[in-house]
Amino acid sequence: MSSVEVRYLGHAAFSIEHDGTKVLIDPFLTGNPKAAADAAELEADAILVTHGHEDHLGDTAGIASRTGAPIATIVEIAAELTEELGPDHVIHDVNLGGTIEFDWGWAQWVPAWHTSTTPRGTVNTPAGIVLNIGGRTIYHLGDTALFSDLALPGQRHSLDLALIPIGGRYTMDRHDAVRAAALIGAPRIVPIHHNTFAAIDADAEAFADAVAAEGIATVTILDPGQSLELA
Ligand code: NI
Ligand code: MN
């Protein structure tokens, strides 16, 4: 089983790579002061979107249009993207609890406590994404507050990694994120959605120390552009 590379592109954006397949999640690059890549240079075999806020939907339409990559996201956002990209572009719509199967794996959309309206004004329900690729399972929480049902995905799936927002203000803060890490039960954690803008500055080292002190998980702090390998 060859490894899975989890490449952090900044904010909540990732390229998850395995055996030449590249899956983008929440590709917000244009206008992201910490973007580790140019949207015009990214390759994608699929684009998964947690919710419609600009800092998550981001460059989805542009990258999809250029690469032809299929998109999978919540139904209302999918409908808006179909209007934008045309009926021939493959867009998988899904709602909370739903799973989309791909030839490289699958992704399930799970609840997140947040709000969401796209820049074009489409109201939609936000989500987290549980992604399976190359035999590994990764839980991207999207934007969410702390809530007890964050424990549920880990009761069904054997999670290898959780990507947890710690920036506060628009999501849980680093203190609630420690409780979230305990609920989720993944053995490895990468903090996300912090230090992109001043409003979401957070001490990732303090988060990592708190998680380690309780023996919850191993935290890897990634700078934008860095990768974590799931061996
Ligand atoms: Ni949001
Ligand atoms: Mn956000």
Image (cartoon, rainbow, N blue to C red):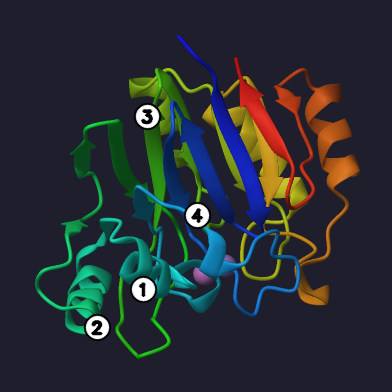
How far apart marks 2 and 1 lie (CA) works out to 8 Å
Look at mark 1 in the image and give the residue it sits on: 61
Viewport quadrant of the N terminus = top left
**Position in image of residue 53 (x %, y %):** 47, 75
User: Is 230 drawn above or below residue 116 in the view shown?
Assistant: above
Asked whether mark 4 and ligand 1 are closer than 8 Å, the reply comes as: yes
| Mark identifier at residue 176 | none
- Amino acid at dot 4: Gly
Work out whether mark 2 precedes mark 4 in sequence or the reverse, and give the earlier one: 2
From the image, state whether disc 3 or disc 1 is nearer to you.
Answer: 1
Q: Which mark is residue 84?
A: 2
Residue 170: x, y in percent?
62, 69
Q: Is residue 149 above or below residue 3?
A: below
**Mark 4 to mark 1 CA distance (whole Å):** 19 Å
Q: CA distance from mark 3 to mark 1?
A: 23 Å
Q: Position of residue 2 (x, y in %)?
A: 49, 14
Residue at the spot 59% in from the left edge and 36% down from the top edge: 6
Q: Give the mark nearest the N terminus, 2 or 1.
A: 1
- Looking at the rendering, the quadrant in which ligand 2 lies is bottom right
Pointers 4 and 1 in contact (CB under 8 A)? no
Residue wearing tag 3: 132
